[in-house]
Amino acid sequence: CTSNSSAEEPPIDKSHGGLLSLAFDEASCRSRFESWKLWKSSNYTTSPYLLQKLRSYEDLHKKCGPNTRLYNKSIEQLVSNRSTGPMECNYVVWMPSDGLGNRIISITSAFLYALLNDKVLLLFLSEDMNGLFCEPFPDTTWALPSNFPIKNIRSIWSFNKDPNRYGSMLKKHLLSNDMRISSGSFSLPPYLYLHLVHDNDDYDKMFYCEETQLLLQNFPWILLRSNQYFVPALFLVPKFEKELSLLFPQRMTVFHLLGRYLFHPSNSVWGYITRYYEAYLANAKERLGMQIRLLGEVDFNSHSSYIIDCALTKKLLPSLDTKDVALSNLTGMNPKAVLVASLSSGYFERLRDMYYEHAAVTREVIGVYQPSHEERQHTEKLSHNMKALAEIYLLSFSDSLITSPFSTFGYVAQGLGGIRPWLLVRHDNNLCLQSLTMEPCFHFPPSFECKSRSRMDLGAVVPYLRHCEDFPNGIKLF
Ligand code: GDP
């Protein structure tokens, strides 16, 4: 047969509907081009407006990126110790807090904030993150240069008491939201520090109010530390309403699209991912990811029974044929693969033993795999974070997911994969339910109305923001 099948195949769209810039060399970042083959195909499209916005952001980042003339000019202003208002290039410097999942969701939020305000996002990449990801923007870097003049950026905790912390300045009346550069009567500090970590107070949370957003436009340098997915709150700022509806006509795609745009594992992490995938998952006829994160003491037997019960009752896994009457012919069958991600190995072992010791009633072959069991969180170690990123990605290649409540590790996997996970919401009453969306939850949103400062439930203001299924105090986009 001489038919040329490749002539009939549609050409591969390496930009994935225009989401990714083609100005990259494939060898320098293989995941950018290869991960799409492993994800289930996404039904979600990218709006032309988002595509245009990303391309102009890339131009801006290239123009203003580290060590450009305009970057140096903005740095001069920073060291001069007072702000004279916005410059040609204005920046958001992101600082990390907590584990990798927390970091990824907060970088995504900071990036959307930067997009909405024409600011340039730079990341303070500590040693434990250096080399995890490829650069997302062509011909430039998102890494903050090591000679950045604000030196205590290395000891991030000292920022809690930083004199330029926005919330504290507001509390002490050193700054007010109606302050404008043009008034000439104030001199603004050279930067503002936004404390957007879960433990912040209502003053810091004023960040989510429109009046603050207007004030922040005056600052060429915003330093921001967060472990939260604060995207949902940006949807409540009237000033951003129109822009956000053009960028994301389907609101629940924000993390899915921005996550796939921003986070490409470096070649070394991609090596972990592809070796594991090819060895254990590629031949499976179906893949189930199970992400088990313990945030307190649990009784292993009852907790593992609860998780297995969820998988069986939701028909994600077949029940066991405990009678094992007749042996059917299983050779040559493609297994159904279960990928377990957990710091401990007990859950994996119990599940693996179950399908080793008994046949499934459906006669399917079930392969159970766990890439690592690190026992403890070691966010300060790069090698540990490489495995965490590899496992987040491996989970995202699943057909279905079971995830743990309140865990940003799971949120990232579900968002990248475009999967609505089954959430292990209530161990005590055996409840597991499928999330309505793939969006992460904003765990600690403000709980007041901006103008009157009176208490308000943000999960009840607009139909597209609701309380999270796994953490009712939080809010998420629908
Ligand atoms: P969260 O604390 O569940 O919201 O997720 P984070 O990712 O922010 O922090 C948990 C950290 O613990 C991860 O980043 C990893 O460093 C580690 N960790 C937790 N679960 C796993 C797991 O299943 N596999 C691996 N390799 N690391 C994990």
Image: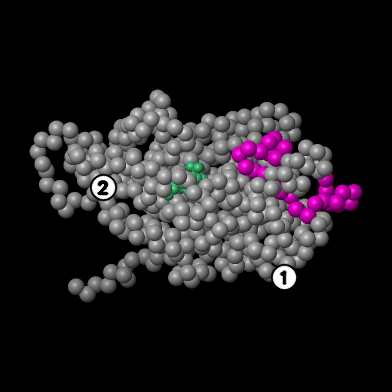
Image quadrant in which you'd find residue 8:
bottom left
x and y percent of residue 74 in the render? Answer: 75, 63
Apparent side of residue 382 relative to residue 204 in the rendered image (left or right): left
Label 1 is placed on what type of residue?
Answer: Arg
Q: Residue furthest top?
A: 429
Secondary element at image label 1? helix
Q: Residue furthest bottom?
A: 2
**Label 1 sits on residue:** 69
Residue 78 at x, y = what percent? 77, 59
Q: Amino acid at mark 2?
A: Gly
Residue occupying the point 35% across, 29% down: 302
Q: Which residues fall within the magenta stretch?
A: 178-206
| Above-or-below relation of 267 to 165 | below
Q: Write the residue at 69% across / 61% down.
A: 148
Asked if residue 71 lies left or right of residue 317, the reply is right
Q: Which residue is mark 2?
A: 367
Mark 2 lies within 8 Å of ligand 1 (Cβ measured)? no
Label 2 neighbour load within 10 Å: few <14, some 14-19, many 20+: some
Task: Please indicate, yes or no, whether residue 238 appears anywhere in the rendered image.
Answer: no
Q: CA distance from mark 2 to mark 1?
A: 56 Å
